[in-house]
Image: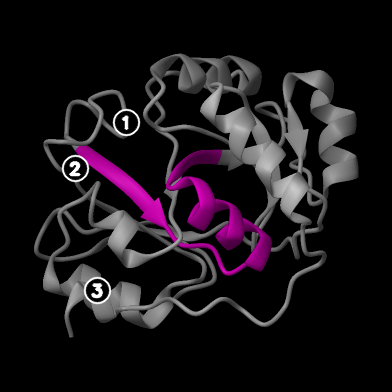
Amino acid sequence: MEASERAIPKPPWCATFQTMAELQDAVEAIRRGEIVGFPTDTLYGIGVDPYSEGAIDGLFRLKGRPAGKPMALLVASIDQAMGLAEFSDRALDLADRHWPGGLTMVMPKLRQAPPWLGDPVRRTIGLRCPGHATALELLDAIGPLVVTSANRSGEEPAIDDVTARTLLGDAVSVYLEGRAPGGSPSTVVDLTDPAPLVIRTGPVEEL
């Protein structure tokens, strides 16, 4: 199957669908290098433009997260992901079976990807396609985003926009309404070696 034929269907459920005006507000904020909040299929997330190093620095500062601990990117499709990472046959198979869903894949980063993304030493990048319609609509409109949970490091993560706003306030420019189902964070698997290495266990077990 060609990459262009690998269409990722939108899931049938979503806590709330955004109006076009709300979605456009989020897109414009991201383009300005600001932080935007939105629900995903695991937790409520906050994200920024992966092509803006300053925006990513701001996200790390807001989280209080060590700079040496890379954040994953969310994508709307396999085609978007293939613009950032080198997909092996195994990675394509896993994406076909588990995207959208709770699987983050760590893969070799393509040369054209911004140097500040992922692990600069190993030249890897973590990618996931979330199974939440609001997240997919935003990602389809703006492209891949660097995303993390809506909380400061050490705090309980938010699962909806109301809690996220209480935790982070005006540091996030736009909060798209919605609630995440909660539960386990995604399974993270490293595909840079011949044998997949599970870095974090989660909802996806069949690899």
Residue 157, position as x, y percentages in the image: 74, 42
Q: Quadrant of the C terminus?
A: bottom left
Give the residue number, with chain letter if any, for mark 3.
Answer: 4
* Distance (Cα) linking label 1 and label 2: 9 Å
Does the stretch in magenta take in 137? Answer: yes
Give the residue number, with chain letter if any, for mark 2.
Answer: 109
Dot in front, 2 or 3: 3
State which region is magenta: 124-147
Amino acid type, mark 1: Leu
For image coordinates 17% across by 79% down, the residue present is 2
Q: SS at mark 2? A: loop
* Distance (Cα) linking label 1 and label 3: 25 Å
For image coordinates 61% across by 78% down, the residue present is 11
**Residue 96 appears in which quarter of the rendering?**
bottom left
Residue 46 placement, left or right of 75: right
Answer whether labels 1 and 3 touch (C-beta < 8 Å). no
Amino acid type, mark 2: Lys
Q: SS at mark 3? A: helix
Q: Earlier in the sequence, mark 2 or mark 3?
A: 3
Q: SS at mark 1? A: loop
* Distance (Cα) linking label 2 and label 3: 20 Å
**Residue 73 appears in which quarter of the rendering?**
top left
Give the residue number, with chain letter if any, for mark 1.
Answer: 117
Image: 81 above or below 29: below
Residue 129, position as x, y percentages in the image: 46, 62
For image coordinates 27% across by 81% down, the residue present is 5
Query: Can residue 198 be seen from the camera position used here?
Result: no
Q: How many neighbours does mark 3 have within 10 angstroms: few (below 14), some (14-19), or many (20 or more)?
A: few
Q: Nearer the viewer, residue 66 or 139?
A: 139
Disc tally is 3
Amino acid type, mark 3: Ser
